[in-house]
């Protein structure tokens, strides 16, 4: 059954290819009947007149058909071009792509139906009613093969033209990156390059990232923020490595445009749209918590860490350990040194029992607890922890929990 279906589909496609590739529009069969080609595909492709029609009249009918075909070719050309430039201005989605494909097929079909109607009316008006038949001009298989070969060449040429159309997109991306790296302050030119890209090609996450940075450097903070929101919306539920930079910059720019609290609210709104792993959730919470501490709005940090810990499976010991380590770090940054020391006590006890897995982490935990003890006035305990960490004294400063003032992250 499957073989038969496959064979039938193959025969149908071969027949369709022969019909499409065949440039003939009229012939006289062995009985002297005149057959005009209509606009149908696959079957009932000919209009048969069981009479002889003067060549001059046939010529006029074919001229009318040629004129219709010229207009139809313009529809074939302009429809995908117009739809393409409309499509690239909207948010990409498979549903939108399917809609535009359906619209494309619909417009082409309606245009062919209209041409078919006009041609039918012309034939009936000048030659009377016709019979439906198959358009099978008396030509050799070799001739058919040459027609098919010519069509394939045309299709290949179209594919090459389309490919060449997209070549400048790669060149423009390279130029845009060079403009952003240049020491000549070409940021406004970079914005123009990105705008030109978007005018010619589909929306692209990389170009949004590059344009956002160019806008920021051009002091267009609102435009940069809009681009980061656009790219986060574009990627949907998918979370990528680049989203770390995008979310950090979203916080930074939203704060510039409004307030720190509104920046956090917008951050939360976009984060909830993403489907993330536990590790990614903890990293996003880290970014947000650092921002809150820097901007003196730390009230909900502990609760958010507790909520994340509560969401973990009881057997997920590893994520619980790392998230608890982040939480202890935040206690230090919030200057809750006593609570931080208590949190580090629990973490160090656990890591000490699992040194084969958490040996490196244990060093950092000792050093961080040492700094917490030092800040709380326990110099003896601090020195004991520093020694227990095994870290060279000259390197201890790099282990103190701290954060740098937030700046826009380049991300490329």
Image: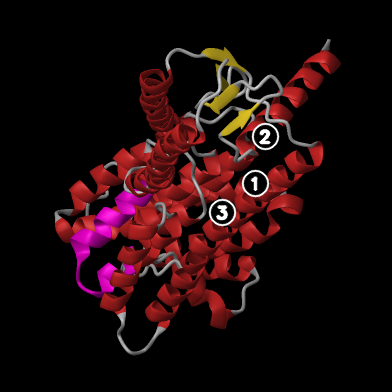
Picture coordinates of residue 175 (x, y %)?
44, 76
Counting residues from the start of the chain, the first of labels 3 and 1 encountered is 1
Picture coordinates of residue 67 (x, y %)?
39, 41
The residue sitting at the bottom extreme is 184
Element type at mark 2? helix
Boundaries of the magenta span: 212-232
Element type at mark 3? helix
The reply to whether residue 293 is visible in this rendering is no
Which residue occupies 48% across, 74% down? 174
Which residue occupies 68% across, 53% down? 358
Q: Answer yes or no: do the residues labelled 1 and 2 have beta carbons within 8 Å?
A: yes
Marks 2 and 3, Cα distance to the nearest angstrom?
Answer: 17 Å
The residue tagged 2 is 17
Picture coordinates of residue 330 (x, y %)?
39, 53
The reply to whether residue 39 is visible in this rendering is yes
Of the two numbered discs 3 and 1 in the rendering, the one whose residue sits closer to the viewer: 1
Q: Look at the image and name its color scheme.
A: secondary structure
The residue tagged 3 is 158
Give the quadrant of the N terminus: top right
Answer above or below: position of 373 versus 312. below
The residue tagged 1 is 151
Marks 1 and 2, Cα distance to the nearest angstrom?
Answer: 9 Å
Q: Answer yes or no: do the residues labelled 3 and 1 have beta carbons within 8 Å?
A: no
Verify whether residue 227 appears in magenta: yes
**Label total for image:** 3
Q: Quadrant of residue 307?
A: top left
Marks 3 and 1, Cα distance to the nearest angstrom?
Answer: 11 Å
Picture coordinates of residue 154 (x, y %)?
61, 52
């Amino acid at each position: 059954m499957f073989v038969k279906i496959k064979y039938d589909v193959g025969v149908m496609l071969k027949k369709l290819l022969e019909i499409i590739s065949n440039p003939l529009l009229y012939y006289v069969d062995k009985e002297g009947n005149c057959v005009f080609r209509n606009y149908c595909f696959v079957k009932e492709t000919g209009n048969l007149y069981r009479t002889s029609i003067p060549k001059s009249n046939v010529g006029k009918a074919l001229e009318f058909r040629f004129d219709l075909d010229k207009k139809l070719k313009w529809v074939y050309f302009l429809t995908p071009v117009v739809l393409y430039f409309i499509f690239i201005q909207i948010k990409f989605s498979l549903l939108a792509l399917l809609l535009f494909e359906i619209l494309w097929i619909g417009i082409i079909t309606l245009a062919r139906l209209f041409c078919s109607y006009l041609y039918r009316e012309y034939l009936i008006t000048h030659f009377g009613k016709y019979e439906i038949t198959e358009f099978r001009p008396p030509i050799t298989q070799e001739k058919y093969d040459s027609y098919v070969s010519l069509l394939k060449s045309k299709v290949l040429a179209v594919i090459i033209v389309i490919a060449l159309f997209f070549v400048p997109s790669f060149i423009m991306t390279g130029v845009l990156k060079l403009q952003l790296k240049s020491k000549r302050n070409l940021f406004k030119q970079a914005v123009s390059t990105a705008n030109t890209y978007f005018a010619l090609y589909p929306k692209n996450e990389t170009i949004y990232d590059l344009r956002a940075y160019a806008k920021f450097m051009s002091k267009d903070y609102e435009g940069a923020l809009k681009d980061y929101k656009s790219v986060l919306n574009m990627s949907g539920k998918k979370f990528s490595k680049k989203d770390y930079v995008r979310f950090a910059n979203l916080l930074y720019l939203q704060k510039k445009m409004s307030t720190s609290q509104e920046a956090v609210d917008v951050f939360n709104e976009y984060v909830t749209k993403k489907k993330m792993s536990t590790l990614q959730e903890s990293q996003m919470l880290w970014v947000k918590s650092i921002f809150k501490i820097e901007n003196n709005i730390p009230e909900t940090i502990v609760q958010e860490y507790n909520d994340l810990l509560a969401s973990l499976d009881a057997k997920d010991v590893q994520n619980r350990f790392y998230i608890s380590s982040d939480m202890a770090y935040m206690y230090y940054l919030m200057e809750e040194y006593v609570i931080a020391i208590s949190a580090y006590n629990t973490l160090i006890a656990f890591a000490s029992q699992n040194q084969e897995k958490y040996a490196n982490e244990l060093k950092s935990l000792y050093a961080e607890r040492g700094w917490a003890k030092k800040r709380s006035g326990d110099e003896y305990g601090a020195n004991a922890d520093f020694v227990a960490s095994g870290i060279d004294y000259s390197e201890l400063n790099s282990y103190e929990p701290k954060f740098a003032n937030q700046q826009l992250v380049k991300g490329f």
